[in-house]
Amino acid sequence: MPDITKGKRRRRYTRAAVVKALAESRDECTTSVGLYRTTEPELDMTLMLWFPPQPPSLELWLNVKALDLFTDEARCQAFVEMVRAWAIRYPVLSYASAHSMADDELSGDPFYGREERVAQENGFDQIYAVYWLNLFGPKLVETVGRERMRSTPAHRVEELPDGSILLVTWPTAADFASEAARVAQARAWVHLRPDLDFDTVMATLRERSTTLAPVEPRFAPDVAALLSRLPEYVSIGQRQRRIAELNAYVPPEPEEWLPLSAALPSDVADPKAALEQYAYFAERLVALLHTPVPSVLKGSPESLTDIDFHFWRQTFPDTFERHNIDAVAVPAIGAYLGEVLVKHLGGQWLPRKQWMEAQVRVGDRVWLPFARAHRYMRSTQSLLDHSLTQLYRVAERHSRY
């Protein structure tokens, strides 16, 4: 069940809230409502109604996470029965399906790519794909051939009262990528599309299964907390491939440090004023980020990872004017990083007239937080290659020596 309803406003889910959302979202031909869950299992669902002069219809899009919910055959059967009841009450005009979103995306079929446009233009004049659950409308059934449809090798084939056909390839949805489920999918597909070759279809399906095979994250330890957030920001069908890429990624070792013996001595006349300036710079970062990155208010090591991720997600260095980045962002970031080194690693500022040369002493090294911030802000890739997270973790490790 959803707990959030969204039209033009978000509301707690009630039937009355759904009615309000539909009313406030209505335009000349359509209205829609979004339904969501804020706790697991996740639900992202949209209902859209079409009105005259368009052909009156109901469109439904439903995404449930995680797919592991559908390892249980009884639950899958209950889902199929629900879809069957919908299809009897609201007959399918052309086609409907239920399947893994990641695999659906890789297929390039309905909801995602070229095949959808072709299908819409031609009114689903042939079978463009076969999924775990399929509903073929009466027109499509007649085009393919009713007896051919009814004789499809599949887990379940049922003709509904309006002449549409419900087809389920395999008992459970979650193991769609297993070899046995892929064979069942391919057999059904080539039966409905005699022009296709079974071996070719199987090769395609196996390739998709390989792409979707779970990859265990083994990220570089110093940046694991940052890298673990990145796969979510590629398409769902490419996430396992992205994890594999990030497993192989090792950022360069930080160069923004000197041995204590080579530290530059402080050359400012008023060290207290210099430290107040650094604190002021750091507060500017807090003022900038406290809403999108609330952890900056704590000045914690974890906040550095939140900052890294925020700037990466915004593509900040590649989006904003270079002058403003160098004049405002770099000193604010460098000062904040330095303050975290002081607060959590017992560091000591060694202020300099040129703030880019300012250092923080931690153990037997001095770190150059402003120099790190300057390199960090060169590009979006630099946010990963020269992250604040990594420098802090390396400094933390050396502080123990």
Image (cartoon, rainbow, N blue to C red):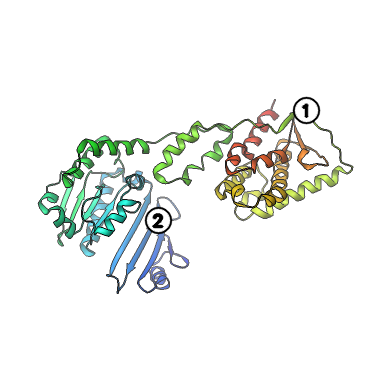
Which residue type carries mark 2?
Answer: Asp
Q: Which residue is mark 1?
A: 260
Q: Quadrant of residue 256?
A: top right
Q: Earlier in the sequence, mark 2 or mark 1?
A: 2
Gap between marks 2 and 1 measured at Cα: 55 Å
Q: Quadrant of residue 291?
A: bottom right
Query: In the picture provided, is 42 more to the left or to the right than 261?
Result: left
Q: What secondary structure is found at the residue carrying circle 2?
A: strand
Q: Which mark is residue 44?
A: 2
Residue at (37, 61) in percent of width and height:
46
Residue at (22, 57) in percent of width and height:
84
In the rendering, at what x and y percent does residue 330 appear? 70, 46
Q: Quarter holding the C terminus?
A: top right
Q: Which mark is residue 395?
A: none
Residue 56, placed above or below residue 291: below
In the rendering, at what x and y percent does residue 400 appear? 69, 28
Q: Quarter holding the N terminus?
A: bottom left
Label 2 Cα crowd, 10 Å radius (few <14 / some 14-19 / many 20+): some
Which residue type carries mark 1?
Answer: Leu
Q: What secondary structure is found at the residue carrying circle 1?
A: helix
Residue 288, placed above or below residue 213: below
> Seen from this angle, which residue lies furthest right?
269
In the rendering, at what x and y percent does residue 314 appear? 57, 50
In the rendering, at what x and y percent does residue 234 appear? 45, 45
Query: In the picture provided, is 344 more to the left or to the right than 90?
Result: right
